[in-house]
Image: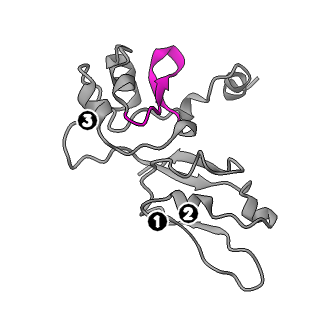
Amino acid sequence: MHQSRRNFLRGRGDKASLIRPPWTLSEATFLEKCSRCDDCIRGCEEKILVRGDGGFPVVRFDLGECTFCGACRTTCSEGVFVVGEAVQPWQHKVEIQPGCIVYKGVVCMTCRDQCEPRAIRFTPQLGGLSPPLLDAALCTGCGACIAPCPSGAIQVTTQRG
């Protein structure tokens, strides 16, 4: 059985799809330095950080969005977060999957309404429903569109430079 399928059946996510708190160091360094003290989890104002596999913090967008308040990194004393104001929080973006109910003929613009940077828009189409269009340059990967999506058709992916 494939490893990610095994993890799925055991109720664990695919390790490649784990989303660590914003501003964390590389995965290997993060796992090495993080003591699993839960300071970042307690500090998260949106309560979207939870203990994942092995007790390490992960982001759960089904619980809400990341506002990039920075409380996770300011409460950490282990040095697992990058410091500096000019540092991007992460390289995540959302991806709208084919399961979007708009593709099934249902009018829905919930994701657009939740997206503060206006990265998701719907352009009217003559004779049909408007499909969602994502402007990746505007998407912060905050996840605000994920929990409200009625079809669960939005995922966060890591963008590779």
Q: Position of residue 108 (x, y in %)?
A: 68, 63
Q: Are marks 3 and 1 in contact (CB under 8 Å)?
A: no
Q: Are marks 2 and 1 in contact (CB under 8 Å)?
A: yes
119 in relation to 157, above or below: below
Q: Is residue 17 left or right of residue 153?
A: left
Read off the residue under disc 1: 118
Q: Which residue is mark 2?
A: 112
Q: Earlier in the sequence, mark 3 or mark 1?
A: 3
Q: How far across and how far down the image is residue 129, in percent?
A: 73, 74
Range covered by the magenta-colored residues: 45-60
* Real-space Cα separation, disc 3 to disc 1, in angstroms: 27 Å
Q: Is residue 15 magenta?
A: no
Q: Earlier in the sequence, mark 2 or mark 1?
A: 2
Distance from the alpha carbon under mark 3 to that under mark 2: 31 Å
In-front residue for pair 3/74:
74
Q: Is residue 53 magenta?
A: yes
**Amino acid residing under circle 3:** Val
Left or right for 106, reference 74: right
Q: Say what amino acid the circle numbered 1 marks.
A: Arg
Mark 2 neighbour class, 10 Å CA radius: few under 14, some 14 to 19, many 20 or more: many
Badge 2 marks a residue whose secondary structure is: helix
What amino acid is found at the position of numbered circle 2 in the picture? Arg
* In the rendered image, the vertical position of residue 155 relative to residue 23, given as above or below: below
Where is residue 138? Give x, y as percent.
Answer: 42, 63
Query: What is the x, y in percent for residue 68?
Result: 34, 44
Helix, strand or loop for disc 1: loop
Q: Residue at x 37, y 23 (%)?
A: 42
